[in-house]
Image: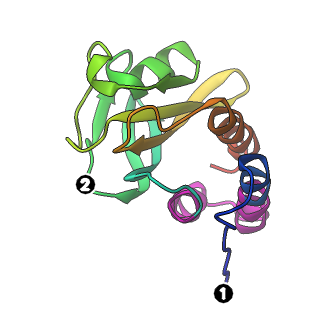
C-alpha cells in the first residue's frame, strides 16, 4: 500500500518535488498507461488543494477522450481546438486560465469550475493527452503550478 501525504505547509516547489517523486514511485515499471493515469489522478487530488477536478484526457482518433480522473463526472469527448483542453491539445502548449468563463469556447463540464490548468503530454513531438486541473477558485493556478505539472507531464510521457 502507498501512503503519500503532502505537507500542506510546504512551499510549492517542495510540494511538486514530492508529487513528482510519488508519481515516479507509482508509475515506474508499470506498463499499463490507464493504471498509471488513475494513480496519478488520485495523487493530484491528494496533493493539490482547492481543485475540484484532476485528471487526464487521452488522444484517440484525433480527439480527446476522457481518461482517469478524480472529481465529478466530466465531458467524455472534446474536439481539438475546442475548450481549454482542446486548445492545449491542438497547440501543444500549456493553457493556464484565470477565469474559464472569459475563455472563448470554454466547455463547462462542471459549473463550479472557475480556473483551469491544462498541460499537454507530448511523446516524440506528438500530443498523446493532457493533464487537466480545475478549481472553483479564480486564478487558482500560477507559474509554480504550471512548472510542476509540466515536469509531471514530461515524466509521464513514456508511462501513459
| Mark 2 surroundings: few (<14), some (14-19) or many (≥20) residues within 10 A | few
28 in magenta: yes
Query: Which residue lies at the image location 68% right of the left edge and 62% below the top edge?
Result: 9
Measured as percent of width and height from the top left, residue 112 is found at: 24, 44
Q: Is residue 62 visible?
A: no
For label 2, the SS is loop
Q: Is residue 144 left or right of residue 41?
A: right
From the viewer's side, name the closer residue of 130 and 4. 4
Which residues are the magenta region? 19-46
From the viewer's side, name the closer residue of 22 and 67. 22
Query: Which residue lies at the image location 33% right of the left edge and 17% below the top edge?
Result: 103
For label 1, the SS is loop
Residue found farthest to the front = 9
**In this figure, which residue is indicated by the disc labeled 2?**
73
154 to 28, vertically: above or below? above
In the image, which disc is placed on residue 123? none
Quarter of the rendering occupied by the N terminus: bottom right
Quarter assignment of residue 148: top right
42 in magenta: yes
**In this figure, which residue is indicated by the disc labeled 1?**
1
From the viewer's side, name the closer residue of 16 and 35. 16
Measured as percent of width and height from the top left, residue 16 is found at: 73, 51
Residue found farthest to the bottom = 1
Query: Which residue lies at the image location 69% right of the left edge and 36% below the top edge?
Result: 144
Quarter assignment of residue 73: bottom left
Query: Which residue lies at the image location 40% right of the left edge and 42% below the top edge?
Result: 134
Q: Main secondary structure of the magenta part?
A: helix
Amino acid at each position: 500500500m502507498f501512503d503519500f501525504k503532502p505537507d500542506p505547509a510546504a512551499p510549492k516547489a517542495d510540494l511538486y518535488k514530492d508529487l513528482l517523486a510519488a508519481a515516479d514511485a507509482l508509475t515506474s515499471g508499470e506498463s499499463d498507461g490507464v493504471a498509471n493515469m488513475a494513480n496519478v489522478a488520485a495523487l493530484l487530488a491528494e496533493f493539490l488543494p482547492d481543485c475540484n477536478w484532476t485528471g487526464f484526457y487521452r488522444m484517440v482518433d484525433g480527439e480527446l477522450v476522457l481518461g482517469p480522473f478524480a472529481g465529478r463526472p466530466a465531458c467524455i469527448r472534446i474536439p481539438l481546438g475546442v475548450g481549454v483542453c482542446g486548445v492545449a491539445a491542438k497547440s501543444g502548449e500549456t493553457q493556464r486560465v484565470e477565469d474559464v468563463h472569459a475563455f472563448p469556447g470554454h466547455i463547462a463540464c462542471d459549473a463550479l469550475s472557475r480556473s483551469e490548468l491544462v498541460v499537454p503530454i507530448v511523446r516524440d513531438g506528438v500530443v498523446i493527452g493532457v493533464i487537466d486541473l480545475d478549481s472553483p477558485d479564480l486564478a487558482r493556478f500560477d507559474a509554480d503550478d504550471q512548472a510542476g505539472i509540466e515536469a509531471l507531464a514530461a515524466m509521464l510521457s513514456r508511462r501513459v
